[in-house]
Image: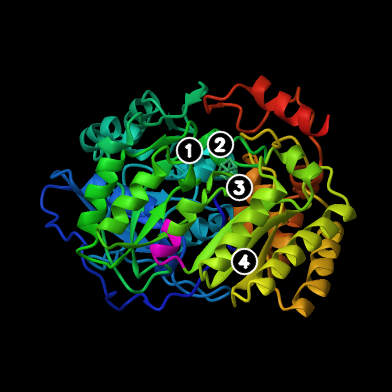
Amino acid sequence: MIRHKTRITRRSRYRQGELPREEGACRKDWGGRLPIVLIYPNSYYLGMSNLGIHAVYRLLNREDSVVCERAFQEGGNGEKKPAVLSVESRRRLTDFAVIAFSISYELDYFNVVSILKASRIPLRAVDRDERHPLVIAGGPCVAANPMPLSPFFDCLCIGEAEAILPKMLPVLEEGIGGRRDELLKTLASLPGVYVPRYNGRTVVRQRVANLDDFPVTSVILTPDTELGDLYLIEVQRGCNWSCRFCLVSTVFSPARFRSVGRLLETAAEGLKYRPRLGLVGPAVSDHPQLEELLTGLLRMGAKFAISSLRVNRLSDRILEAIARGGARTITIAPEAGSERLRQVIKKDIGEEDVRRVVEKAAGLGIKQLKLYFMVGLPSETDEDIEEIIRLTLESRAVLERKQSGTRLTLNVAPFVPKAGTPFQWLPMASLQTLNRRISRLKSVLPAKGIKVKSESPAWSQVQAVLARGDRSVAGVLESIEEVTLAGWRKAVEKCRLDADYYAHQRWDTGQALPWGIIDSGVKAGQLERGMEKAVG
Ligand code: SF4
């Protein structure tokens, strides 16, 4: 699944106004080309580790008729944000014909609003015309539920850029400079494009069939990013495990893998730039030829890190290969402590699998073991939290017995219901329950030498409102004066938004969903059956 740390804006080492230390950026002459600025609405530090940014940057700049530059939101929380400038030519956003946001995380919606406001671009699409840049967006959050952002965008891309852009670019090239309403009407007729002003129709999510047709790797290399020592390679998209809380298995499905041959070719190229590779995907260990891939990488002398492993897919041979590839950390995501709750969420891994991988990792000299859990899952009780404690302490006992020196870290995140998943109708737990359960974990485990990191329940509640929100949530985003919890509450009150309805109420399966216009390819009946099997 996609995991994010709660952050509104993460500080970068790169500051706007300086040139970042990077290689591979594309600087084109603007003459006669369609200028597009691709914005990651958070810091350069975070954005440059997002493969989606690299992929779209490559796709756009390979067109001779387009010049694509990047922009990020710098400045810490609460700081007055300056107008954003593009990295490549230091131009203002209003100098571009198209402003394209790539949005991966709901809490970045605040930055979307502040970026447009600071650039003096009318926030609502209805207030813009031919004199303004066309403002568009894509990314996982938009594909799941574009509604809270929909008043701000001229159009939103529902699905994968590789599938949508080839049809969209000629329309933009033809229509920019002409009448805006004509351009929007034409965009609204394209597959996967949602134009809030004109669409009443269902928008079908777009995806590519064969990943090998579209390389997705680091395009620009910089040390000033989270994963700056790695050359990133996308191995997989989508996931077939169907965990009931997870967006990946519905919004990005089905699972697709790059071929081993293509991955090894890409790896050989990447090793010219970095000695370590980052293999990226929601469940990389599902690759049907994982062993062959890892053996091939080891033969090349590559060091590598893998973003996600399912313990029930890890044979001893694969774990050994991962260790020989220089992995320092292994991350396991049981998500729930008890077998019962793992069945509820359909996280199909057993305690035996966890134990076996911990035992093996300890013997392989892995420096850090991270365990990911969620709290507040549907039907969770205090006993389930005690089961997290038990499983964690058992894992620590294995590490101690092996005298491996492996550090154990627990990452805890509140469950947030996401649009397009079987749990989309279910409420998140109350703040009181979440705080109590996280406090229980923090009161027991650190005393035993286990580091516990947790996401903020209060910000997760905000995230839930944005994830299940409709157009009325846009009013709150628009009117917030200060992006703090107090600022959020003030704006919610001012707009008379019933935040409790979006975050904490169970919805009737018969009611219309805000994101009902999106056809993600998964039938509502299938989602409903999943939810009923879980909680009845
Ligand atoms: S294994 Fe489950 S949680 Fe992980 S990406 Fe797949 S569906 Fe999501």
Single out the mark in the foreground, 3 or 1: 1
Which numbered marker is on residue 483? 4
- Asked if the residue under mark 4 is in contact with the one under mark 3, i.e. CB atoms within 8 Å, the reply is no
Q: Which residue is mark 3?
A: 474
Given the image, on which type of amino acid does mark 4 rest?
A: Val
Identify the secondary structure beneath mark 4. Answer: loop
Q: Amino acid at mark 3?
A: Ala
Q: CA distance from mark 2 to mark 1?
A: 6 Å
Q: Distance between the Cα atoms at labels 3 and 1?
A: 29 Å
Which amino acid type is shown beneath numbered disc 2? Ser
Determine which residue is flagged by label 2.
249
Q: Residues within 10 Å of mark 3 (few under 14, many from 20)?
A: many
Left or right, 220 with respect to 501, comes to: left
Residue to which mark 1 is pinned: 238
- Helix or strand or loop: what does disc 2 sit on? helix
Q: Mark 2 and mark 1 in contact? Answer it, CB < 8 Å.
A: yes
Mark found first going from the N terminus, 3 or 4: 3
**Distance between the alpha carbons at the discs numbered 4 and 1:** 32 Å
- CB at mark 2 closer than 8 A to ligand 1? yes
Secondary element at tag 3: helix
Question: 365 and 453: which one is in front?
Answer: 365
Q: Is 143 covered by the magenta stretch? A: no
- The residue drawn where x is 44% and y is 71% is 74
Q: How dense is the environment of label 2, judged by Cα within 10 Å: few (below 14), some, or many (20 and up)?
A: many
Tell me how many marks there are: 4
Q: Give residue 130's position: percent from left, percent from top.
A: 32, 42
**225 or 411, which is in the foreground?**
411
